[in-house]
Amino acid sequence: MTVLAESGTGWTVRPSLHRLRRVATGAGRLLAAFVPVFLLGSIFTFLLGALSGRSPAVIQLGENATPEAVEAMNKEWGLGRPFLVQYVDWLGDVLRGDFGVSWANNTPVSELLAGRAAISLSVAVLALVLGVVVGSALGALAAHYHGSWFDRGVTIFTSIISVMPPFIVGIALIVVVAVRFEWLPAAGYVPFEQGVWPWLSHIILPALALSLDTISDMARQLRVGLLNTSKENYVTGAIVRGLSPRRVFFVHTLRNGVGPAIAVLGLKFPNLLGGAVVTESIFQLSGYGLFSAQSAIKGDVPAVQAVLVVAVILVVVFNLVVNAVLALLIPASKRGV
């Protein structure tokens, strides 16, 4: 980061040590927040696998396997060691990107997840983008036309969509958009490498089904934040000083009123990942959600653990990014960065 400083020969550019120090301190705090949360999440994830009582012998040898065969296979997979030893070895492998081998088909779990990452992230990111863009537009317009019929219409609309389950919305979208009008595919997934539109056309409907709750919360939180901020003294002072309405809105009202809307995003991303299980089943998408459900039914503990670890990482990183953006827009908030 740099600032302009006036010297005897004119303006020169010098680094802002204070700004760099703030950035470094913020990055350090983000890392300090990430490490303990990740460790707690990994311990809880591994503990769930240990408490499940499942083993590869039950899956591969069947219910009629002899105790000797079960014990031999468990020993082969290293399940007879102390819990702490197993956890430390597993965590070390996870940090290297190795999630172990699937008990169901002896395939590395990282390979099974790699093909599903693009599917789940594509749907979740598009749902998040739709939620932020549409919700922000509705919230800003509702605040601008406060008390009008448009404001009341936005309030009613967001209240309705906030209670609509994604699977109901998904079925309705398939019936109307895909079957009745044949505008978009009803199910399946096409990789991005095969074309932007084929890829996008297959994820629009599931993303839209998942985005309604985010649209509702973003619109309501932004509307409330903007209305509360518009009553602050610094906004009134800016208007009195003769600043243009656009400058007052973007520099003073929006920047300080967007805080509640951004904060709610930290809670939305976990919901998008959690809601993907049913949505992926409806739209026949082989993503993380469907994979985790199928692995849990089979008792494939390494696969379930890998999905949980990836989900923890994604949720924690996303929340750290949200907090960083919030602190950047509203430094006075000091939300951990």
Image (spheres, helix red, strand yellow):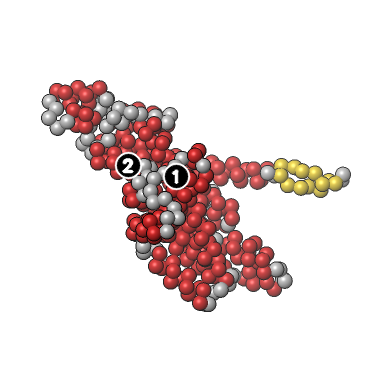
**Where does the image place residue 127, in percent across and percent down from the top left?**
46, 53
**Of the pair 281 and 228, the residue shown nearer to us:** 281
Residue at 53% from the left image edge and 58% from the top image edge: 133
Q: Residues within 10 Å of mark 1 (few under 14, many from 20)?
A: some
Residue 44 visible in the snapshot:
no
Quarter of the rendering containing residue 49: top left
Q: Of callouts 2 and 1, which one flags the residue occurring earlier in the amino acid sequence?
A: 1
Residue at 73% from the left image edge and 47% from the top image edge: 3
Residue under label 2: 292
Say what secondary structure mark 1 lies in. helix
Residue under label 1: 121
Residue 193 visible in the snapshot:
yes
**Where does the image place residue 304, in percent across and percent down from the top left?**
31, 38
Does 165 sit above or below residue 87?
Answer: below
Q: Residues within 10 Å of mark 2 (few under 14, many from 20)?
A: many
Say what secondary structure mark 2 lies in. helix
